[in-house]
Amino acid sequence: QVQLVESGGGSVLPGGSLTLSCVTPGGTFTDYAMAWFRQTPGKEREFVACISRVGVTQQYSDSMRDRVAITRDNAKSTLYLQMNNLRPEDTAVYYCAAHSAGGFAYYTEAYDYELWGQGTQVTVSS
């Protein structure tokens, strides 16, 4: 079973940028549609962005649509989330998720995803 390992989180000033990565050691990355979610204490896990198995289609949350880009490198079995112009309200634990799916479909609900990483903390603060 594929494992998901996130990295790239950290502390950044408002307006700053971060790139999160999610690698999938030991699995067939190209079998999965992928996504990023985030969660803050006491709240439901929130959709950020997703990408189809073949990487052709993407979808973004309204709150981050103009500030993030989700990409995947199937040759490196790695998912990325480039985040720009970060705001304090973007502070959260960010999770990578995977769903076994067809080539062009994408999924925005957490319940669609059967595999999750351990999360990486992103803190935006002055």
Image (tube, rainbow, N blue to C red):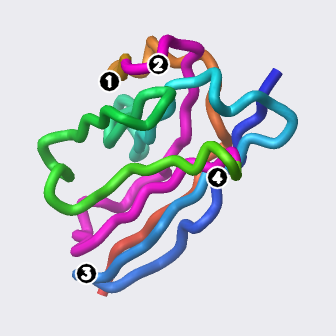
Q: Is residue 113 left or right of residue 115?
A: left
Under mark 3, the amino acid is Pro
Mark 3 vs mark 4, foreground winner is 4
Q: For the residue labelled by badge 3, is the local secondary structure a helix, a strand or a loop?
A: loop
Q: Position of residue 103 (x, y in %)?
A: 47, 18
Q: Are marks 1 and 3 in contact (CB under 8 Å)?
A: no
Q: Which mark is residue 98?
A: none
* Amino acid type of the residue tagged 1 in the rendering: Thr
- Magenta span: 77-104
- Badge 1 marks a residue whose secondary structure is loop
Callout in the foreground (2, 1): 2
Where residue 78 appears, x then y in whole percent? 63, 49
* Tag count: 4
Query: Residue 14: which numbered mark, if any?
Result: 3
The quadrant holding residue 97 is top right
From the image, state whether disc 3 or disc 2 is nearer to you: 2
Q: Which residue is mark 2?
A: 103
In what element is the residue under mark 4? strand
Q: Residue at label 4?
A: 6
CA–CA distance between discs 3 and 2?
Answer: 36 Å
Badge 1 local density, few (<14 within 10 Å), some, or many (20+)? many
